[in-house]
Image (cartoon, rainbow, N blue to C red):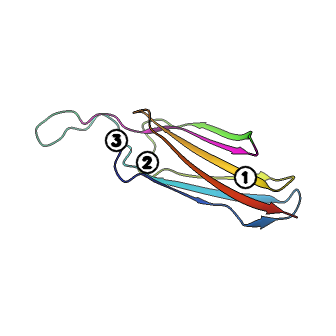
Amino acid sequence: MADNVKPRVRVPKSASVDEVVVIKTLISHPMESGQRKDRDGNTIPRSIINRFTAEFNGTSVLDATLEPAISTNPYIEFSVKLPESGDFKFTWYDDDGSVYEDVQSIEVA
């Protein structure tokens, strides 16, 4: 597990029916490619967020595969049209098997 990993998500508190809203996510993560060496010449093990998913009320709205070339602290922004109130579940998957999650609610009127 990478140290000090912290997901941050910005979801509007409310929206109108069928309004397109912008969702912003960022996760603090070093994203080590596995190609660098430490001071002793040993290869630093690869540790990247390799997959990100977003679900709304249990339905997948985004499923992204991330590759080693992605930057430290990956930022993902996407738009979605919401038919009803509910919960977003955001999940980040790390190479080492760690899973980071965040849940945010939105009220649609």
Figure label count: 3
Location of residue 35 with respect to 27 vertically, above or below: above
Judge whether 66 appears above or below 103 on screen. above
Residue type at mark 3? Glu
Magenta stretch holds residue 36: no
Q: Residue at x 49, y 50 (%)?
A: 74
Crowd rating for badge 2 (residues with CA inside 10 Å; few <14, some 14–19, many 20+): some
Q: Quadrant of residue 4?
A: bottom left
Would you place residue 55 above or below residue 45 in this image?
below
Indicate the quadrant containing the N terminus: top left, top right, bottom left or bottom right: top left
Q: Which segment is the magenta one?
A: 44-57
Expressed as whole percent of the image width and height from the top left, the position of residue 94 reads 45, 37
Question: Which residue sits at x=76%, y=45%?
Answer: 57
Amino acid type, residue under disc 1 in the picture: Asp
The residue under label 1 is 87
Q: For residue 54: magenta?
A: yes
Name the residue that disc number 2 marks: 71
Q: CA distance from mark 3 to mark 1?
A: 31 Å
Residue 84 lies left or right of residue 78; in this view the side is: right
Q: Nearer the viewer, residue 96 or 61?
A: 96
